[in-house]
Image (cartoon, rainbow, N blue to C red):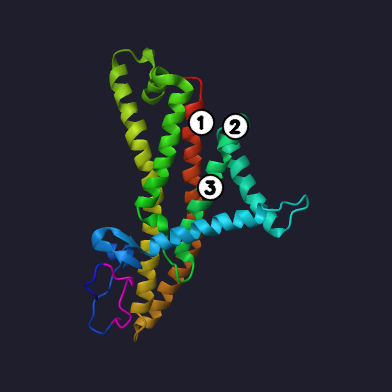
């Protein structure tokens, strides 16, 4: 197997069972890519995940631009699909969590997050791309950071400094002597743990899903030799199962991310703190 840690391929194509070579299991090298442009040593480069993120952004913007550039009273197929997606997020997530009156202004943000994350996840099963951008922690971390800034600034804007402090600490004087400890735990949980788990939940699911998909794909190829062909067939079935499962998880993780985002915003807007 190549010693190059930035090897794009997850395995060597000439390695099979009974050939005297070990199973080339996927690992961190499966998430590292050679720069398409620039130098990795100088940290100034452009690689495959960056390209996919850029293309994904262009696809999402282009899709909604084409769908709504010239909207019609009787929508065509493209406009109808775009409206269904937009309404699903607006009515099914934003309105249900934040409410119509307060939530309307946040619909563009939530719609953008949902479809961007979904597209970044979908790259995992698209031929030639075959890599979920969100399986690299930097991307979920930036998205969670954006949500964090919106949530914290909105809390201070709505409640002022004292009200925001009570919001973040879960201030409740009825707790008596344990109030300081409870406030410290709530403050740590809300301002540090919450954004961390928001990012890691998306990252970990896509990282694990891609690892399993690569594992069964490599195993299928590795066992295509002699008696191993029978086992290769079973492994290939698992590839198909994982592809179907990943389709579900990709949409689910986009949904969960924006649902939590709406929950944070709703908490910041709530008056009972």
For label 1, the crowd category at 10 Å Cα-Cα, with few meaning under 14, some 14 to 19 and many 20 or more, is some
Picture coordinates of residue 103, whole percent (x, y) = 58, 34
Q: Is residue 246 visible?
A: no
Q: Secondary structure at mark 3?
A: helix
Measured along the vertical axis of the image, is residue 195 above or below residue 228? above
Residues in magenta, as a range: 6-17
Residue 153 found in image quarter: top left
Q: Is residue 110 visible?
A: yes
Q: What's the residue at 40%, 53% (across, down)?
A: 205
Q: Secondary structure at mark 1?
A: helix
Residue at label 2?
99
Name which of mark 1 and mark 2 comes first in the sequence: 2
Q: Which mark is residue 112?
A: 3
Measured along the vertical axis of the image, is residue 262 above or below residue 48? above
Picture coordinates of residue 186, whole percent (x, y) = 34, 27
Decide which of 124, 67 is in the foreground and name it.
67
Name which of mark 1 and mark 3 comes first in the sequence: 3
Q: What's the residue at 29%, 81% (across, down)?
A: 15
Magenta part mainly helix, strand or loop? Answer: loop
Q: Is residue 38 left or right of residue 255?
A: left
Residue 215 found in image quarter: bottom left
Picture coordinates of residue 223, whole percent (x, y) = 34, 79
Picture coordinates of residue 16, whole percent (x, y) = 30, 81
Name which of mark 2 and mark 3 comes first in the sequence: 2
Q: What's the residue at 56%, 32% (across, down)?
A: 98
Decide which of 252, 152 is in the foreground and name it.
152
User: Is 132 contained in the magenta span?
Assistant: no
Marks 2 and 3 sit apart, C-alpha to C-alpha, by: 18 Å
Tags 1 and 2 in contact by the CB under 8 Å rule?
Answer: yes
Q: What's the residue at 62%, 30% (across, down)?
A: 101
Marks 1 and 3 sit apart, C-alpha to C-alpha, by: 18 Å
Residue at label 1?
266
């Amino acid at each position: 197997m190549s010693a190059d840690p930035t090897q794009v391929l997850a395995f060597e194509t000439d390695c099979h069972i009974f050939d005297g070579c070990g199973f080339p299991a996927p690992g961190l090298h499966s998430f590292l890519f050679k720069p398409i442009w620039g130098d990795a040593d100088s940290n100034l480069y452009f690689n495959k995940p960056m390209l996919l993120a850029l293309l994904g952004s262009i696809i999402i913007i282009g899709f909604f631009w084409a769908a709504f550039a010239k909207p019609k009273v009787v929508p065509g197929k493209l406009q109808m699909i775009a409206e269904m997606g937009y309404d699903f997020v607006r009515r099914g997530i934003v309105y249900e969590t934040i409410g119509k009156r307060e939530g309307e202004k946040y619909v563009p943000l939530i719609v953008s997050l949902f479809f961007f994350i979904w597209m970044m996840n979908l790259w995992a099963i698209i031929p030639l791309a075959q890599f979920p951008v969100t399986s690299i922690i930097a991307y979920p971390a930036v998205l969670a950071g954006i949500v964090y800034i919106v949530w914290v600034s909105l809390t201070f804007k709505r409640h002022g400094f004292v009200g925001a402090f009570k919001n973040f600490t879960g201030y409740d004087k009825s707790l008596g002597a344990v109030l300081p400890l409870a406030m410290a735990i709530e403050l740590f949980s809300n301002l540090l743990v919450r954004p961390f788990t928001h990012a890691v939940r998306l990252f970990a699911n896509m990282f694990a899903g891609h690892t399993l998909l690569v594992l069964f794909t490599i195993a299928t190829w590795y066992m295509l030799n002699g008696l191993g062909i029978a086992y290769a067939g079973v492994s290939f079935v698992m590839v198909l199962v994982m592809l179907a499962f990943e389709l579900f998880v990709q949409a689910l993780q986009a949904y969960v991310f924006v649902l939590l985002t709406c929950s944070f915003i709703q908490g910041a807007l709530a008056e009972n703190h």
